[in-house]
Image (cartoon, rainbow, N blue to C red):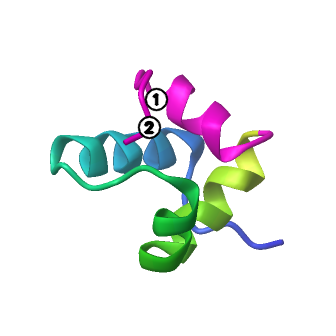
Amino acid sequence: MKVDMTAKEVMSQIQQLDENGESLRKKQVKQKHPILMKNALYFFPSWQHAVVESGISDVS
């Protein structure tokens, strides 16, 4: 699998989505930001894990 981002970039984009008030629910991110989701699942065992590692405790 080819990755387009580093793990730090993935976490940064997750933080940016959160700061912009966008939903971090897996289904919605997968639809709106499929490349981010693909890269997150490459570096982390789950989407939830990627969100928590990004310093966000609540997926909204």
Crowding near pointer 1: few (<14 within 10 Å), some, many (20+)? Answer: some
Disc 1 designates what residue?
54
Q: Give the position of the N terminus as an image quadrant.
A: bottom right
Q: How many marks?
A: 2
Residue 36 place in picture, x, y as percent: 52, 63
- What's the residue at 49%, 52% (across, down)? 25
Answer with left or right where residue 4 lies relative to residue 25. right
Give residue 56's position: percent from left, percent from top: 40, 26
Q: Quadrant of the C terminus?
A: top left
Picture residue at 58% right of the left edge, 68% below the top: 4
User: Mark number for residue 41?
Assistant: none
Question: Disc 2 marks which amino acid?
Answer: Val
Q: Nearer the viewer, residue 27 or 38?
A: 27
Query: Is residue 52 inside the magenta stretch?
Result: yes
Which percent across, then down, holds residue 13? 36, 50
Foreground label between 1 and 2 = 2
- Answer with the quarter of the image where residue 5 lies: bottom right
Position of residue 53 relative to residue 39, above or below, is: above
Residue 59 is tagged as 2
| Contact, mark 1 vs mark 2 (Cβ under 8 Å) | no
What residue span does the magenta drawing correspond to? 45-60
In terms of image quadrants, where is residue 15? top left
Q: CA distance from mark 1 to mark 2?
A: 11 Å
Identify residue type, mark 1.
Ser
Q: Relative to residue 51, is residue 22 depicted above or below? A: below
Percent x, y of residue 17: 29, 51
Q: Secondary structure at mark 2?
A: loop
Q: Residues within 10 Å of mark 2 (few under 14, many from 20)?
A: few
Q: Secondary structure at mark 1?
A: loop
